[in-house]
Amino acid sequence: MTCIVGLEEDGVVYIGGDSAGVDSGWGLTVRADEKVFIRERSGDPWIFGFCGSFRMGQLLRYTLELPEPETGDDLYEFMVTKFVDAVRFCLTNGGALYSKNGREEGGTFLVGYRGQLFCVEEDMQVGRSVAPFVAIGCGDHLATGAMHALHGYDTSPKKKITAALKAAEQYSAGVRGPFVILDSSGKPARPKAAPRP
């Protein structure tokens, strides 16, 4: 249960997420450990936002060995092959990749690298949307609709993502602020959550 929103704009990737930790009985904990974070390798920032298992997010944040593309590598091919291989190894060793119906399943997360936004699904497929934005988690349709409505408006990427997360928080029981929004230049922005009754 969560909402993560990603946006590509002018060579920068922005990812924002909520702070809800929701159990199977809809019990809620507002988590201090953030679902959105930045890693670096050789001066290149990688920006992540995950939904589902916090264990998966912890492994991506602290133990994933980020691969480095070789000169001339196609970025999408690199993500589908070398990056996913590194993720599979990390999640398997950390106990967060499972075999279900004869195939491996992990969790879903967004990753931004070298100005491009990718969505890695539970079965480790790597997707790229034709739209410059994508959302995942239980609030994904609400946030995607908000991003679609705001697309083309002259407002900052972080304001668009904030509006999308607020829409998801307002209409989904599994989404809760505070929100964390980062961009691939490494500058955090932490808008206030919508007021609660």
Image: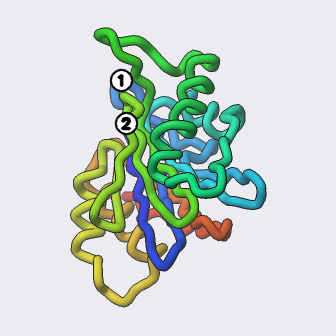
The residue sitting at 56% across, 37% down in the picture is 82
Q: What's the CA distance linking mark 2 and mark 1? A: 26 Å
Residue 151 visible here: yes
Q: Quick one: SS at disc 2? A: loop
| Residue that lies at the very extreme toward the front in this rendered image | 72
User: Closer to the camera, 72 or 92?
Assistant: 72
Quadrant of the snapshot with the N terminus: top left
Three-letter amino acid code at disc 2? Gln
Q: Quick one: SS at disc 1? A: loop
Above or below 1: residue 19: below
Residue 28, image x and y in percent? 44, 36
Above or below 188: residue 141: above
Residue 65, image x and y in percent? 70, 36
Residue 27 visible here: no
Residue 124, image x and y in percent? 41, 32
* Left or right of 168 on screen, residue 38: right
Label for residue 120?
Answer: none
Label for residue 125?
Answer: 2
Q: Earlier in the sequence, mark 2 or mark 1?
A: 1
Label for residue 24?
Answer: 1
The residue sitting at 28% across, 49% down in the picture is 172
